[in-house]
Image: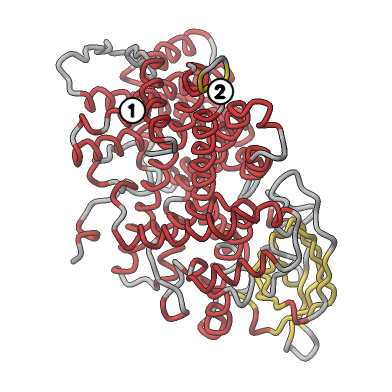
Amino acid sequence: MSTVAEKTHLKGGEFLIKETAADDVFIPENWDEEQLMIAQTCQDFIDQKVVPVLARIDAQEEGLLIDLFNQAGELGILGVSIPEQYGGFGKDFTTAMLISEKTGPGASFSVAAMAHTGIGTLPILYYGNQEQKDKYIPKLTTGELKGAYCLTEPSSGSDANSGKSRATLSADGKHYILNGQKMWITNAGFADIFTVFAKIDNDENLSAFIVEKAFGGITLNPEEHKMGIKGSSTRQVFFNDCKVPVENLLSERGNGFKIAVNILNLGRIKLGGAALGGAKAVITQSIRYANEREQFGRPISKYGAIRYKIAEQAIKAYATESAMYRASQNIEDATHSLIEGGMDEGKAKLKGTELFAIEAAIIKVHASEALDYIVDEGVQIYGGMGYSAEAPMDRAYRDSRINRIFEGTNEINRMLTVDMMLKRAMKGELDLMGPAQKVASELMSIPDFNLDEEDFFTTEKKYINNFKKAVLLVAGAAVQKLMMNLAKEQEVLMYIADMLIETYVSESILLRVEKLAGQRGEDKVAEQKDMMQVYIRDAGDLIFKAGKEALNSFADGDERKMMMVGLKRFTKTEDLNTTAARRRIAAKLIEENKYCF
């Protein structure tokens, strides 16, 4: 039995009720030589081939994006996670996430490549039969064929299953006749293969079809004029009596909605990877500009206001990265265990991601909002030049905004996070009730604020455990008070989601720094410890505010007062000179002249 199988791993969502050992998480400082080599190949391609022509990509120069796709395919960048039998490298999920990160600074190219390798390819790889995979996957892996994904319609966005596109069987039984309209389709302008979702006749649920552009009956609207990601092809796609061979039905009839949901789980966490890559690039640009730009006779990087911004950019990126690769390894470990248990590899990969759908939604929200903060402060550090289209922050600022809408809006993902938690509890997959009741009874006890003679990480872990209690306190009270009406109280759900997100990310950065300190020694990770401490204290404040707003929404009288006392207790942290900590973090970044963590 392998080491992976022997280890005990938490199930998705269990982070809220169980502790994780630092040695059980993956940290990016532990990439092996092969992974770093693959990452360098991807980074070199982005730096040398993509970044110099970003303006030409944004202008949608004819054939340029296709040429870059072909070059990326030749290097194997499009096939990192594709099995070797189809011409890919067959690498694990964490390696695929690393490539998502390294592709992130590629702006519109990144969007096009991520759509192709993710939603454009994976539905066929994971749900196609052998004939379908043999026919399409090798050419999608090399980039010879370009893929797109047709789900959204004018009247169905977040509510994907309400789509009106229809497919009917032809009289001779050889084709499905497809009719419908799709919008916001990435890569539509040059895609050869479309994964299209439509209902067969009057079915309740969607089915999925592999549609070749060559089938005919497909027309495109002109390119959309967008706020950002201007170089990516985004068009409406119309299917007018498009004849799809019956053998191109993907998976089973009525299984389309399940396909869409599972592929979106993958898309969410991979979007987090791309956002992280973009964030790191922006931080490096911010630092270098701050070191070069002089005002009042000295570089602006010497000033405290600028150092605050640089440090905060880095803290948010480091925290996001910690959570993202923790979840990525969880998905990989779950997948490995399922395969060892006899499950088909494709199904295991989907199931592994599904098991950690809560964490995937958390990563999507946190990474996209961290990127938005980082690019906004990047503009501010550049000052007037930040507002100029000649400087890099213009593109970064506009491009970042879509990430809070892509792969399900952040509002939908917040509500999904809590909804999935509660549904798993109702199914008996997560024991939330027992811990929630224990927290409620703890409110009557005398708190112990004595942190003397505890080591550094024990103290920080106590904060995280208390954050979990705060979530259980508020969520438990909301369920008990609102019951079936909780699903309608979207504001309360989003407050609880914010508490969950900050708790998960806080624990992730703590575990990363603890593991790194164990490997290098605490004196070698001083700035990482600073980042972790600052993040956890800010998270405590955010958790308290979200919890307070939630409690004020449904509780009153003595009950509310008692829970507020508990909330304050569970979000309390010892005072820290965060100004000095941020200065130390910024000093390291400024000295290195780049994002260096």
Rendering quarter of residue 245: bottom right
Look at the numbered discs 2 and 1 and tell me whether their residues touch, using CB distance below 8 Å.
no
Of 279 and 147, the residue lying toward us? 279
Quick one: 20 or 135, which is closer to the camera? Answer: 135
Residue at the limit of the structure toward the front, as seen here: 297
- The residue tagged 2 is 294
Task: Report the side of 457 relative to 188 (left or right).
Answer: left
The answer to whether residue 546 is seen in the rendering is no
Q: In this figure, which residue is indicated by the disc labeled 1?
A: 464
Q: Residue at x 69, y 68 (%)?
A: 196
**Mark 1 falls on what kind of element?**
helix
- The quadrant where residue 195 appears: bottom right
Amino acid on which disc 2 is placed: Glu
Q: Residue at x 48, y 58 (%)?
A: 44
Q: Is residue 375 above or below residue 134?
A: above
Q: Residue at x 72, y 67 (%)?
A: 198
Q: Residues within 10 Å of mark 2 (few under 14, many from 20)?
A: few
Q: Amino acid at mark 1?
A: Ile
